Amino acid sequence: MVLMFPFRFAVALFREDGASLGTVPVDRDWEPVYEWTRFYFQRKDELALDGNGSASVLPLWEYTLGEPYCRGYRLQIAQPGRKPVASDFPKTHFRNIASVAASQLVEHKQLREGEMYSYMVVAHPAPPEEPHSSGLTVANASPGVPAQDAALDTFLARAKPSGILHEGDMPAFVSRRVLDEAAEQTNANQGTETGGILIGRLWRDAAAGEIFAEVTAQIPAEHASGTNVKLTFTPQVWTAAEAALRLRRKGEIYLGYWHSHPVREWCKGKACTPEAQKTCSLGRDFFSTDDEAVMRAAFPRAYSIAIVANDTAFTDLTFSMFGNREGITQPRGFYVVEETTSAAK
Amino acid sequence: MGNAESVLEIPLEISDVSGQKVFSVSNAPANNTVGELVHEMLGKMNLPRNDASGAPLSYQARLEREGRHLNASERIGDALERGDKLTLQPNIDAGAQL
């Protein structure tokens, strides 16, 4: 995939009275947005499963102010001989950049702590890019989405929903055995983060116009080193996972990873009251920026998912799932399957 | 005397850990180090160079033919053969940053 930028984006910050605080160039990771857009149209059968076409990031001008002010941006993917596909995203995707810039203004005493500010996104035509003189000649030989045919209904009939299901998310089915193993591993490592690699299959229901994932197994990350606040996935973890995947010979692929959050241990360290623990945001559906970084580095495709085992003092072990929704990693619901579906046999 | 192409440039296949991003390199310079190759490929493959806190991420290249991790200082011409497959494996933390 080649991502092209005919425009350069920037975030302009203003005081509450409208006075300008300056402009910062947008330097962000566009890959999750590209991956989500690509997979969204592949699910709808509007983009080839092996499509690695070029994509462009284009400004969406403000309705009233017009150019150069943006209400958001469009990610457009070209496909040979067919109409391009595109998704539009709001300017809130730039909020973090504005927030970081505001923090720096506070550090430099150009903005007071807690002072209100607003931001606008602007875009200007980019100058022509200098040709790269880099020596390596590379070609993208990435495999397409490895989806096999199956009926979504047969999975739904044997599954129970867990968490809040979002209409636009790819359906994700997780074998009960996987969750049981994750629970057992979490309990055996209480107080220390532990985890594993999620493997399974992608299925495609052409009639339903949907691609969905089935997590069939987890490979414990035996070579990972865990503490109460982190789990390090070493090169040895990936090598062992690859060997285990090959040994299984079931045509499974990597679908993501799971890890535990020993929240009860975190609470002990902070001496949180039982009441505070029950409402703490770390107790459920918490996915740190480090957790996201693992997804980005190891499981970049939009069909990848992550599961967190929440080990709290006030309830039994619970599981939260996270996935790429509109280019942002977000908590999502999933389905628990009591046994392997007939489609997977 | 060896083939000039095999001495100067080596074609390789490089993938991420998931095997979902695969790139073929037609001209890895034999005199470069594995570390230099990894560094350049991270950009080509759009793999992150930094972790969430901005610290550099370390990747190791695993050579499938020999089943071993290459040392960053190894010379491509010494360690690799035409058509070799490498996997870039990050050393990365999941964590809570409490």
Image (tube, rainbow, N blue to C red):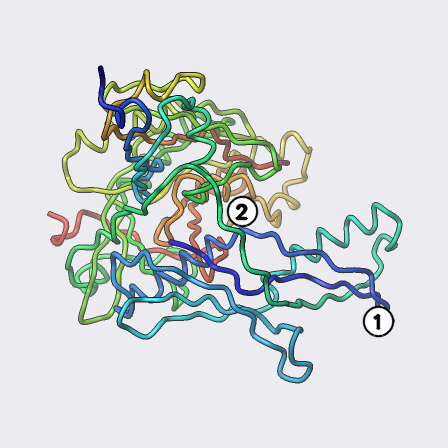
Q: Is residue A168 left or right of residue A67?
A: left
Where does label 1 land, which residue? A18
Q: Is residue B18 above or below residue A118?
A: above
Q: Dot 2 lies on which element?
A: loop
> A209 or A258: which is nearer to us?
A209
Q: Residue at x 25, y 59 (%)?
A: A49
> B8 or A120: which is nearer to us?
B8
> A270 or A206: which is nearer to us?
A206
Where does label 2 land, which residue? A286
- Earlier in the chain: of badge 2 and badge 1, it is 1
Q: Is residue A135 above or below residue A77?
A: above
Q: Residue at x 57, y 37 (%)?
A: B96
Q: Residue at x 41, y 43 (%)?
A: B45
Q: Is residue A120 above or below residue A342?
A: below
Specify few, some or many for label 2: CA neighbours under 10 Å numbering under 14, 14-19, or 20 or more.
some
Q: Nearer the viewer, mark 2 or mark 1?
A: 1
Q: Dot 1 lies on which element?
A: loop
Q: Position of residue A56 (x, y in %)?
A: 46, 64
* Quadrant in the picture for residue A250: top left
Q: Which chain letter matches label 2?
A: A
Q: Residue at x 65, y 77 (%)?
A: A67
Q: Which chain letter matches label 1?
A: A
